[in-house]
Structure formats: structure tokens, C-alpha cells
Image: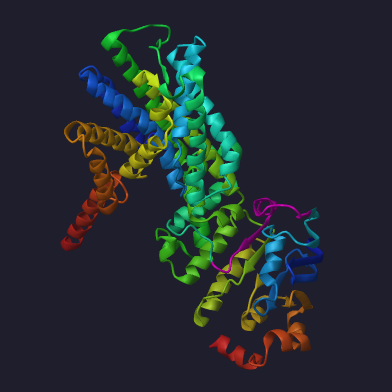
Amino acid sequence: MANVLKVRDLEKNFGGVVAAHNINVDIDDGETIGIIGANGAGKTTFVNMVTGYLPPSGGTIDFMGKSLLGLHPRDVTKLGLCRSFQVAQVFLSESVFDNMLMAYGIAERSGLGLFTPLETDERAARVDEQLRRYQIDGYRNMAASALPQGIRKLLDIAMATVRNPKLIMLDEPTSGISVEEKFGLMDIIMQALRDADTTVLFIEHDMEIVERYVSRVLAFYQGEIICDAPTAEAMRDEKVKEFVIGQEYHPAHAEGGADA
Amino acid sequence: MSRLMDRTFWGLTIGLIALIVLNFLLEDWMRNIGLQSLSRGVVAIGLLILWRTGLVSFGHALFFGFGAYTVAMLQLAGINEIFVLVICGTLTAGILAYVLGLLLRQYRAIFFALLNLAFSMILYGVLAKLESLGSTDGIGIEQTTFLGFTADGESYQITLFIFAAVFAYIAAVGAHWYLKSTLGMMTMAVRENEIRVEYLGYSAERAIHVKYVISGLLAGTGGAIMALTIGHVDPDSMVYWPVSGDFVFITILSGTGNVSATFIGALVYELLRTYAFEYAPEIWQLILGGALLIIIMFLPDGLWSIRSEWRKRRALSGAGETQAAE
């Protein structure tokens, strides 16, 4: 499989605080990877550095053979590496349709093309198709501020994927979502991303979700990766058990809960 | 192209034709109010664009005055054709906005508003000291030629009004089309969520910069028209900070719903000021302040919201009737 993302010796210090240390990651085309770790373990910092939001203190990041160092989030986005957010970043006062329309407008136009009308029949059709793909077409004309949390998350991800990215990083796609809704939400997201052949990396606290959707796990602890292994193996890893999962998680019980 | 020829476009076109016809029937003083409204209305379109982006400028008299003084300087250089004067006034203000925009695009909220004010006061200070441009007394503006033709007396005013209306029409239609474009709609996007704009692949700062230059161009157009209307430019009436305040007043009065609203707002403002000054010279500022208070309390989205409110009510009552019928 072809390499998509290659991260070497990534470091990040905020003053004396080490937020990332000695991070080495290789991601291949078509993988689905879960990032786990306690709060403050450096998961979001990692995503922020890779997508150009935070400059790393050291190390290299290569995406499809191209260095991402020094690039802005907008440049990284254009190269085909997109992200969604823990707190959905949408245009709150606008309708779902207008949110998507803007996303397509920016993705499809540049330079003088930006002066052409935003709304065209063809683009509106693409918007509606994307809304159906993420099953939020029923909320088409509702203001984003009035959406239920889960739908707003789907909108956020639908907006992040308008460029058909090669790799997408989802920052806690199920945070703030009720337990009953989590799996339905993840099914929609993963189906849409699989259909588009997108490589996925997502941050997740819920081990049931991790076990069900990812093939490989990166476990973060105090800014370092303490485990990089296939999911089943990672779940048995002593360090992961001690520092990430804790004692309360019982896989057998959780399986039953998911089926119910 | 049919998406461009929408109701606002036809409304503005009909408005232009109506103004040109009306122009021949107006009294001289009314025509003067009309000219001033057109001039300030054009500037307010620029503020509307910034406002939709979530930005307020307390210093657009800077570009307004720059456009006006460009007219004065061109006349000193012997150039006196209205097209050249207005286009140059527009462009010089636009160039200034581009240069200042390199700094201002990094600021938001109160910092953006007051940095504009600071720059306008610098220009005010320079012009007040500049002997060659008449310092605080200012400098007279001669009657311009129209495509090589000259006009006198009332026919001069009538011709000037037609040209001003056409310039304002071009500015309004251009701004309206711009606001429907991807970049124009980004006003909303930048106001709502800059992070999302960045992660969609566009620079929020660049979007703001473009809007700032457009607002500068429009203020320059307005300033050039105003210079020709009044026949005189001086720092106090063109660049001083209350002039910037007038534009903000008009923008609040008009609301950001539609570019046409800015002309209605500018006219209402002009009439309000003229009559308040005529009938209550002691307390005219009080009347203006009171009017602003009423607008903010009862029509926070400006005069244009009367129209949308009315349409909403009509739609609601229509929906009620169909429900009743079922």
C-alpha cells in the first residue's frame, strides 16, 4: 500500500510543557486509524500540527511525498488533507444548504472565478447530493444553530469532505453525542468515507467505537505514542490498559451493549 | 446570467430611470439633497459590505476625503473631465485602501474600527497643515466638463445629477453582484467562522482585504461626487471623524439587507438633518441622536427590515389561511 502520511520525530513544546515528543507515524492508503488517549495526551495537538494550525517545534511531516512544514491550514486542505472538529465549526446563522454551498464555492473556485455567482443549479445539485450522502437532507433549510448536536457534527464532516480529500482527520466525531446515537452516526460517516476511498484517522474516547471501526490504534500518553498496533493487540497492551483505557472498560459487556 | 438580473437589479434600474426623470422636476435645493444622498449612499454600500463581514469602520472619511481631494488635485493639474475625476478619485482611494489593508486585515472588532479612525485623523492632520491645498480653509472645486461639454447654472446641476446617479447605479449593481458571488458571500463565512474558511481552503485575511479595498473604492467614488456637488473641499467637511460617523449612522439606518437600502437610508438621513437643522437649529443633534436611538431599539436591522418584516407577516398569514382551509 502506498504511503500517505509520514511523520518523523515530531516535537512540540509550549514553554516548558511538552505537548508532543518523538512522534513517528506512517499511514498507508486506505487505512482507518483510531487515536486514543486521555485528555491532554496530545491527540488534538498532533492533528493541529499535521494540518498546519500549529507549527511544530521540530521534526518533519510529509503528505503524499510533500513536506507540510510551514504551510497554512488552507494550503494543507488544498493538497487533500482535511479535518473536522471536536466542536463543529460551521456557519451557525446560515442554513445547512447555505453552509454546504459556501463549502463547495470555496473548494471549486479560485482567483477571478471567485467573482462568479455562488449559487448555480449544478452546484446546488452537488450540495443536495452531499446532504443525502450524510443523511442530513431532512435538515436542508434549518439554521445550523438550531441543529441537534449529531446533525451538526455530520454537517461539519460533510463540509470537510467537499474536496474529496485523500486523508481526513476527525477530531472526536462522537463527542457530545448520546450513546444510542453514536453508532448510527459513525455508520453514516464511515460509509460515506469508504465510498470516497478516503483514508481516515479519528480521535476517539469510546473504545467500543474504536474496536468496531478501526484496524489500527495509536495510543497517546503525555505527548508520546505509547502504542501503535492493530486494534485487538492494542486493546491487550499493558501500557494502553494502564494509561488509556483504565479499569472500567470490559469488552465483553460492551459488545452486548452495542448489539442491543 | 438570469441569476444576475434579479429583483434588486431591476429595482435599481427602475430607480435610476425614475431619478433621471425626477431630476428635471426637482427644485435646486432638493436636487442638492439628492446628490449628497447619492454620494453618501455609495460610501455606505462599502460599509455594508464590511458590516456583513462583521467589521465596522469609524474612519471611512479617510477614503471619502481622499477621493474628494484627488478631484481637487487633478483640477489644480488642469484635468477637469468628470469621468477622469471620478474614476481617479475612486482608484486613488482604492490604492490607499489596498496599502492600509495590508495592516488592517490582521485586526478585528474595535481594533479594526479605531485603527481606521486613527488613519483618517492622520490624513486630517496632514491636510489641515498643507498650505498648497488650502489647509483648514480647503480649496474650491471648479465646474467640471461632461465628456468635453460644459454646462451652466441649473443645467449644470441637472447634468451633474444624471452623471452622479449613473455612477451610483454602477456602484450599487456592481456591489450587489459582488455580494452574490462566492467571494462576496464569504462576508458571511468570515463573520461566522474564520477557522472553517481557512480549513475550506481560503484565507480569511485575504477575503477581508478584498472587501476593504472595495469599500475604499466606493468611498472614493462617493467623495469625488461630493466634491463636485459642494464645489469645495476642506478637511472638516470631508475627512474629520464626524464625517465617518455619518456613514456609520446611515449604515445602521439602512440595515445590511440590500444595497438599495443604503440610498434610502442616506436620503432619510439627509432629510432628517436638513429639517432638524432648519426647524430646531438649537437641538438638531439631539434629534439625530434620538432618531438613531429609535432605529436601534425598534428596527435593529434598519429600514430594510420593514420590508422583510412585512413579507414575513404576509407569508405567515398566507400559511395561516391555507391551514384554516384544510
Residue B91: give x, y in percent of width and height: 52, 25
Q: Residue at x 21, y 51 (%)?
A: B314
- Drawn side of residue B79 relative to residue A208, left or right: left
- Residue A206 in percent (x, y) is at 61, 81
Q: Nearer the viewer, residue B190 or B242?
A: B242
* Residue A86 on the magenta span: yes
Task: Identify the residue at horizontal 40%, vertical 10% (top origin).
Answer: B145
Whether residue A57 is situated above or below residue A250 in the rendered picture: above
Residue range highlighted in magenta: A67-87
Horizontal and vertical percent position of residue A157: 57, 63
Residue B251 is drawn in which quadrant? top left
Q: Quadrant of the N terminus of chain B?
A: top left
Q: How many marks?
A: 0
Type of colouring: rainbow
Q: Residue at x 21, y 37 (%)?
A: B282
Q: Is A30 one of the magenta-colored residues?
A: no
In this view, the residue in front, A3 or B184, is: B184
Estimate the x, y position of residue A197 in percent, counting from the top left. Answer: 67, 62
- Quarter of the image where one finds residue B284: top left
Using the rendered image of the protein, determine whether residue A122 is visible from the camera's viewpoint: no
| A192 vs A163: above or below | below
Pick whichever, B250 or A232, lies toward us: B250
Can you see residue A80? yes
The residue at the point 28 percent across, 20 percent down is B20
